[in-house]
Structures are given as C-alpha cells and as structure tokens.
Image: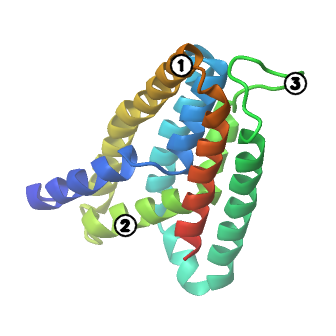
C-alpha cells in the first residue's frame, strides 16, 4: 500500500466511522441509558469486531456476495428487523431507569452485530477494495487497514458514547428526555431506509 492509497483510506474512514449509523446510534443510546462505563464492552465489541471483520473480508469473504447475492439480501433483512426492533424499544426510552433484565450489549453481541450491519459491510468491502493490493504485499496492506480501523474505531466509539452521556445530562436538566426516544427511533428508522434503498 502506497502513501496515496493510505491517505485515501484515512479520508474515507474518518467520515465512515464518525457519521451516524447503526453502531454509533446504538452506542449513543446505550450510553445515555446505561452510562459510559457500562457501555464500554459494547464499544469494544464494535471497535474490535469491525476491525476483525475488515481483515476477514480482506481474506476473501467479501467475494462470497458476488456468488451468493441472496446472502446480501438476507443480511439486509436481518439488520432491518434488528434495527426496527431497536427503534421500537427506543420509543419508551427512560434514561437511567432500567427495567428488569435490561442491560447494554455485551462485547460478543456488539462484535457479532457487525456481520449483519449493512454499513459495516459496505465500509469493510470498500476499504479492502480501495487499498489492499492483490500482489505479494496483500497481507501487509490488510494488516495496515485492520490496524487503521482499530485505531479510528477506538476514537469514534467513545466519542459517540460521550455524546450519549452528555445528552443524558442535558435532557435531565432541560426536561427533554421524553423526546430523546422518539428522535433516536426516527434516526434508526432513517438509517434502515437509507441502507435498504
């Protein structure tokens, strides 16, 4: 991977990681509801799970979609169902008022979610296609992209978690808590519509 390709990767990765998407919205909602500390495993699952996904896609899993088009459709449907369920649960969001059995996602649940997250698939395939050569340096390029995703993800996830926690404090102070769930649910539904079209 040359310097130009690496610069292109970073230029694409920063907005890809920091713009709203299923991962970031879920991290923000979790941090607002459960607090920053309890959301850390979720954040680590997103960060490490996505970096691992990029490496696996780089080893050829992304080509499976070229032969099994139905698999891509199935993943989109599963992600849409999961996210619409999340939107439904957000409608009655009460900050720091967890019901019995409520908890943030675990590390493994968040890492596993990457495999049905359409934005994660789109980014992973794009990053690999953009910067990893098919030649003898393939594995080095893949290692650089994987490490780059790990570093940028380690900056992005806590940013959204901090935003969620700060938002919780602001809403408690201003009395706008009742609108948070509706706003978050609408954002999640919008993200579903965007990736389905």
Q: To which residue does mark 2 refer?
A: 126
Q: Position of residue 116 (x, y in %)?
A: 64, 59
State left or right for residue 13 relative to residue 58. left
- Say which mark, if any, is on residue 101: 3
The residue positioned 25% from the left and 70% from the top of the image is 135
The residue positioned 77% from the left and 48% from the top of the image is 88
Residue 27 higher or lower than 4, as above or below: above
Q: CA distance from mark 1 to mark 3?
A: 28 Å
Question: Which quarter of the rendering shows the N terminus?
Answer: bottom left
Q: Position of residue 26 (x, y in %)?
A: 60, 40
In the displayed image of the protein, which residue is found farthest to the right? 100
Quarter of the figure with residue 3: bottom left
Q: Circle 2: is it few (<14), some (14-19), or many (20+) Cα within 10 Å?
A: some
Label 2 SS: helix
Please state which of the two labelled residues, at mark 1 or mark 3, is closer to the viewer.
1
Q: To which residue does mark 1 refer?
A: 174
The residue positioned 35% from the left and 31% from the top of the image is 155
Quarter of the figure with residue 191: bottom right
């Amino acid at each position: 991977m040359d310097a130009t390709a690496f610069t292109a990767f970073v230029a694409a990765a920063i907005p890809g990681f920091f713009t709203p998407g299923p991962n970031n919205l879920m991290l923000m909602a979790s941090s607002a509801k459960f607090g920053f500390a309890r959301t850390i495993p979720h954040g680590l699952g997103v960060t490490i799970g996505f970096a691992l996904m990029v490496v696996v896609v780089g080893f050829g899993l992304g080509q499976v979609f070229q032969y099994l088009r139905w698999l891509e459709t199935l993943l989109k449907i599963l992600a849409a169902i999961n996210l619409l369920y999340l939107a439904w649960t957000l409608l009655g969001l009460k900050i720091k008022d967890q019901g019995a059995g409520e908890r943030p996602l675990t590390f493994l649940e968040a890492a596993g979610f990457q495999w049905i997250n359409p934005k994660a698939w789109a980014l992973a395939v794009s990053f690999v296609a953009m910067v990893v050569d098919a030649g003898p340096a393939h594995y080095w390029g893949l290692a650089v992209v994987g490490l780059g995703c790990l570093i940028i993800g380690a900056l992005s996830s806590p940013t959204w978690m901090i935003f969620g926690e700060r938002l919780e404090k602001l809403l408690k102070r201003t009395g706008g808590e009742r609108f948070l769930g509706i706003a978050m649910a609408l954002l999640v539904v919008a993200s579903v519509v965007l990736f389905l079209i």
